[in-house]
Amino acid sequence: MFTDLSPMKLLTIAIVAMFVFGPEKLPEFIRNATGVLHKVRAFADSARQDIRSELGPEFKDFEFEDLHPKTFVRKHMLDGDGLAGLEEIRNALDPRPELEEVATVVHDTADREVGTVSLTKDAPAEQHTRHAFDPDAT
């Protein structure tokens, strides 16, 4: 809750509290605030114990922190050294093997039908016959 407070922020809060409550009432306010915090924590602990006792003995190791979605997923997906099944999911969703198979089929088909193509400048270009057409007819 207060983990993101830096020492400078805490010092600023203490100085503001000193000005607001005064040096003579500040200790009394701190005692009252800590008393309220203790009562709230005791109430929360008793509520947790009541819920655990009502759930029965099969839920005796139930932790309320496990209800947080991130904790729930992490607890049920983690398996010893990593995520269980993550490698299978990653392999199932990887399109590379299918793409490589299609690429080899295309290359093999193109090589059989066309043959080898020389990309050097010295290779003679094929003569294409031009079809005569009437530009007014189109």
Image (cartoon, helix red, strand yellow):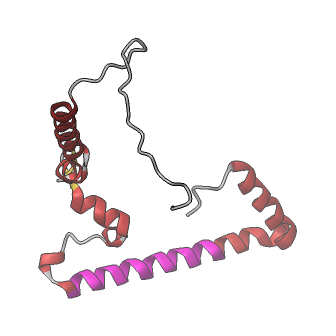
Q: Residue furthest left?
A: 58
Q: How many labels does the image show?
A: 0
Q: Where is residue 110 in the image (x, y as percent from the top left)?
A: 21, 36
Q: Which residue is drawn at 12% across and 77% down?
A: 58
Which is the main secondary structure of the residues drawn in magenta? helix
Q: In this view, does 3 lie to the left or right of 95?
A: right
Foreground residue among 97 and 31: 97
Q: Where is residue 42 in the image (x, y as percent from the top left)?
A: 43, 78
Foreground residue among 6 and 97: 97
Q: Name above or below for residue 56 compared with residue 15.
A: below
Identify the image quadrant of residue 54. bottom left
Foreground residue among 121 and 44: 121
Foreground residue among 15 and 87: 87
Q: Which residue is drawn at 15% across and 83% down?
A: 56
Q: Name above or below for residue 108 compared with residue 79.
A: above
Identify the image quadrant of residue 120. top left
Q: Where is residue 8 in the image (x, y as percent from the top left)?
A: 74, 50
Q: Position of residue 31 (x, y in %)?
A: 65, 72
Residue range of the region highlighted in magenta in the rendering: 32-54
On-image quarter of the N terminus = bottom right
Asked if the magenta segment contains residue 35, the reply would be yes
Q: Which residue is drawn at 31% across and 68% down?
A: 66
Q: Name above or below for residue 119 compared with residue 81.
A: above
Q: Name above or below for residue 37 compared with residue 5.
A: below
Asked if the magenta segment contains residue 24, the reply would be no
Identify the image quadrant of residue 15. bottom right
Q: Residue furthest bottom?
A: 54
Q: Residue at x 20, y 48 (%)?
A: 91
